[in-house]
Amino acid sequence: DRPLEYCHVGLQVERQGGAVVVMGVVEGSPAARAGITPGDEVVALDGTSAQALDLIALTRRMEGRPGRRLTLVIRRNAVERTVRLVRRRLL
């Protein structure tokens, strides 16, 4: 039972060699508006290392009630930045 499955920030991720890599970004989503693009690495989610979370747990932690915030640390070309996103219903 996942009542908030379609309420998230709009990222599709997969694990590549231990790293959590963005594979897709929903057009017009909070993630897209924040400038997150495929190929970016998710380093942390709400203060927890992405490597410490199994991929399903990480993905489900991105789901949640509309209007609730989450914080991601994203790495692109060895540069990390913190983005604060607000979940919203995407479907």
Image (cartoon, rainbow, N blue to C red):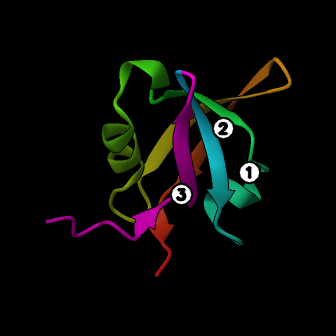
As drawn, the label of residue 83 is: 2
Q: Amino acid at mark 1?
A: Ala
Quarter placement of the N terminus: bottom left
Circle 1 packing at 10 Å, graded few (<14), some (14-19), many (20+), is: few
Magenta includes 13?
yes
Vertical comparison of 34 with 74: above or below:
below
In percent of the image, x 72 and y 59: which residue is there?
A: 32
Q: Is residue 30 left or right of residue 6?
A: right
Q: CA distance from mark 1 to mark 3?
A: 10 Å
Q: In this figure, which residue is indicated by the disc labeled 1?
A: 34
| Mark 1–mark 2 CB contact (< 8 Å) | yes
Q: Report the span colored magenta.
A: 1-17
- Front one among 81 and 40: 40
Please, what secondary structure does the residue beneath circle 3 have? Answer: loop
Q: In this figure, which residue is indicated by the disc labeled 3?
A: 9
Dot 1 or dot 2: first in sequence order is: 1
Q: Quadrant of residue 4?
A: bottom left
Determine the residue located farthest toward the left in the rendered image. 1
